[in-house]
């Protein structure tokens, strides 16, 4: 999970749909804006290029019993079905940080090592603890065959992204004056890139080896 800058202007359809008995909160303009704001990444696992995105409510509306949450633009998030399904567990209700408000990098340690993901809270604040638990489960909860496959797919894609980062860092260290490697690393460490939180964590932990990259982590 990474910090996201949401467009403050709600898509026009939300106000109109909110007036209907069974209005829709996932009209095309909503999907388009969420896709742009979240850079076509699931806000929880950061898997990119989603072919089957879902509009996820950060704060649950409980089958429209809390109607003001259904069409609240600031409550709508871009998610993959796998993560959205895991987040439906009641233990996460109203206990996940809003990555459009709180910078997850300030409250979470999101790490990839030796083929596994580990996510830990940097504080005892409940939302940080529960968010860490959710992200961890999105990569490592393998209690069914379907979830095992979905988790492994995300770990595999994360591994691919991390391996590209490692190779680029090696090239950058070997050829420190090569601007093309700096450009590549700037793009890779951008919050807009897939699995940005994990890549930024790695570089942050090894910043003594790459002090010139610190500006890309701001």
Image (spheres, helix red, strand yellow):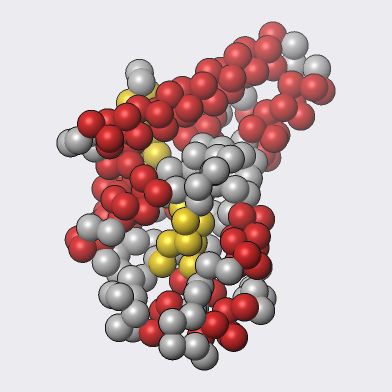
Q: Is residue 189 left or right of residue 119?
A: right
Give 173 or 29, whichever is nearer the viewer. 29
Q: Can you say whether 78 is above or below 183 in the image?
A: below
Q: What is the x, y in percent for residue 80?
A: 44, 48
Q: Residue at x 41, y 32 (%)?
A: 154
Q: Can you say whether 72 is above or below 209 in the image?
A: below
Q: What is the x, y in percent for residue 42?
A: 49, 48
Q: Quadrant of residue 56?
A: bottom left
Tell me if residue 139 can be seen. Answer: yes
Give 17 or 83, whichever is nearer the viewer. 17
Q: What is the x, y in percent for residue 29?
A: 65, 67
Q: Can you say whether 137 is above or below 107 in the image?
A: above
Q: Quadrant of residue 161?
A: top right
Q: How many marks?
A: 0
Q: Residue at x 66, y 55 (%)?
A: 36
Q: Is residue 97 left or right of residue 184?
A: left
Q: Is residue 68 left or right of residue 101?
A: left
Give 18 or 207, whichever is nearer the viewer. 18
Q: Residue at x 27, y 42 (%)?
A: 137
Q: Can you say whether 212 is above or below 59 in the image?
A: above
Tell me if residue 217 can be seen. Answer: no
The residue lying furthest to the top in this view is 174
Q: Residue at x 49, y 88 (%)?
A: 20
């Amino acid at each position: 999970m990474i910090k996201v800058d949401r467009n403050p202007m709600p898509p026009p359809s939300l106000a109109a749909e909110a007036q209907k008995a069974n209005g829709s909160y996932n009209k095309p303009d909503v999907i388009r804006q969420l896709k742009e704001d979240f850079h076509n990444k699931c806000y929880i696992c950061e898997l990119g290029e989603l072919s089957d995105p879902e509009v996820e409510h950060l704060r649950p509306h409980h089958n429209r019993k809390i109607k003001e949450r259904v069409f609240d633009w600031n409550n709508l998030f871009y998610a993959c079905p796998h993560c959205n399904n895991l987040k439906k567990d009641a233990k996460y209700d109203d206990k996940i940080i809003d990555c459009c408000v709180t910078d997850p990098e300030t409250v979470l340690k999101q790490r990839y090592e030796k083929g596994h993901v580990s996510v830990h809270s940097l504080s005892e604040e409940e939302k940080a603890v529960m968010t860490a638990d959710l992200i961890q489960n999105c990569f490592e909860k393998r209690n069914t065959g379907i979830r095992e496959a979905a988790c492994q797919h995300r770990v595999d894609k994360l591994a691919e992204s991390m391996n590209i980062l490692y190779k680029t860092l090696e090239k950058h260290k070997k050829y420190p004056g090569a601007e093309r490697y700096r450009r590549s690393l700037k793009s890779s460490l951008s919050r807009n890139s897939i699995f940005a939180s994990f890549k930024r964590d790695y570089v942050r932990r090894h910043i003594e080896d790459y002090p010139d990259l610190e500006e890309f982590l701001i």
